[in-house]
Amino acid sequence: MILTLDVGNSGIVFCVAEEGERRLRFLLSSNRERSADEYAVMMELMLNSRGFSPDSAEGAIIASVVPQLTPVVCAAVERCSGRRPMVVGPGVKSGLNIRMDAPTELGGDLVAAAVAALDRYPLPCLVVDMGTATAIGVLDAHGSYIGGLICPGMALSGESLAHEASQLSEVSLEPPKRLIGKNTRDSIRSGVFYGAAAMLDGIIDRVEAELGAPASVVLTGDYAAALVPCCRRAGDMRVDEDLIMRGLWKIYQKNTFH
């Protein structure tokens, strides 16, 4: 059993993984003001409340796109479990062939997601991580990570509308009941969801044209399951909530000698 943590700009997905499968998952907010001790207490409480003993973990691994939080979360995990966590980055073997101008710039979450997708889905493959940003990674027919796209996330789009347009208010992002909204709130929801869906449909078409072959598509992250029904290509898409956790598990195994 290991602990996996995906540290994003909005939240931290904390999982207990065993044999590559999730046994526990909970979400903590990415609060840059919170101390390592506070995070450690929260982690321990969550684990204990579900019947898991923190010190029974054999290890831990972290993917982080928030440099300010990485050392804080590392310290919290060590205080909670007694294990020094591995952090995905330079010096950690992923087995992924990253063919980019600056491979070290690729976020640990995308590395982990791509590692899991490479193991579970047909190639070529588009890996879509829907967090604060919508990040799309491309695995070619040989399994190499050849690049991708980074777009504003759905929540960020909704917040930008509320902040920059004085007559529009911030709304909860719930799937719209219809395409054409009958009031301002529904119009915002429809615009955010169907705007993201149309963007994704169009990007998939263009990536496939550039690759010269059809691609499988796997989505993970906050709004993946809600967005897919809005897409024209929904039948070609798979939602995998545990994609990053599975990738972190595989990376941990590659770097651990038993």
Image (tube, rainbow, N blue to C red):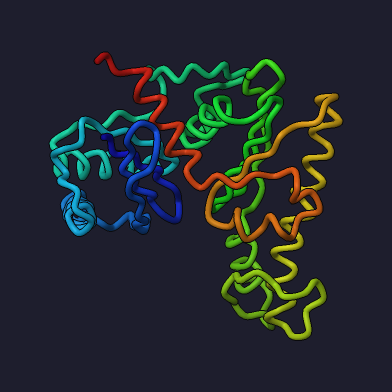
Counting from the top left corner in percent of width and height, residue 16 is at 31, 43
Which residue corresponds to the image point at 63% horizontal and 17% vertical from the top-left?
A: 99
Left/right placement of residue 194 relative to residue 115 reads right
Which residue corresponds to the image point at 53% horizontal and 30% vertical from the top-left?
A: 106
Counting from the top left corner in percent of width and height, residue 80 is at 16, 45
Q: Which residue is at the front of the view, 50 or 31?
A: 50
In the figure, residue 191 lies in which quadrant? bottom right
Task: Decide: is 192 above or below 240.
Answer: below
Counting from the top left corner in percent of width and height, residue 132 is at 54, 53
Q: Quadrant of the N terminus?
A: top left
Left/right placement of residue 149 relative to residue 45 reads right
In the figure, residue 88 lies in which quadrant? top left
Which residue corresponds to the image point at 63% horizontal and 40% vertical from the top-left?
A: 218
Q: Which residue of the protein is positioned furthest toward the bottom in this rendering?
A: 183
Left/right placement of residue 256 relative to residue 171 reads left
Counting from the top left corner in percent of width and height, residue 202 is at 82, 46
Q: Quadrant of the C terminus?
A: top left
Task: Decide: is 77 above or below 121.
Answer: below
Marker count (numbered): 0
Task: Decide: is 107 above or below 150.
Answer: above
Left/right placement of residue 202 relative to residue 253 reads right
Which residue corresponds to the image point at 62% horizontal and 80% vertical from the top-left?
A: 169
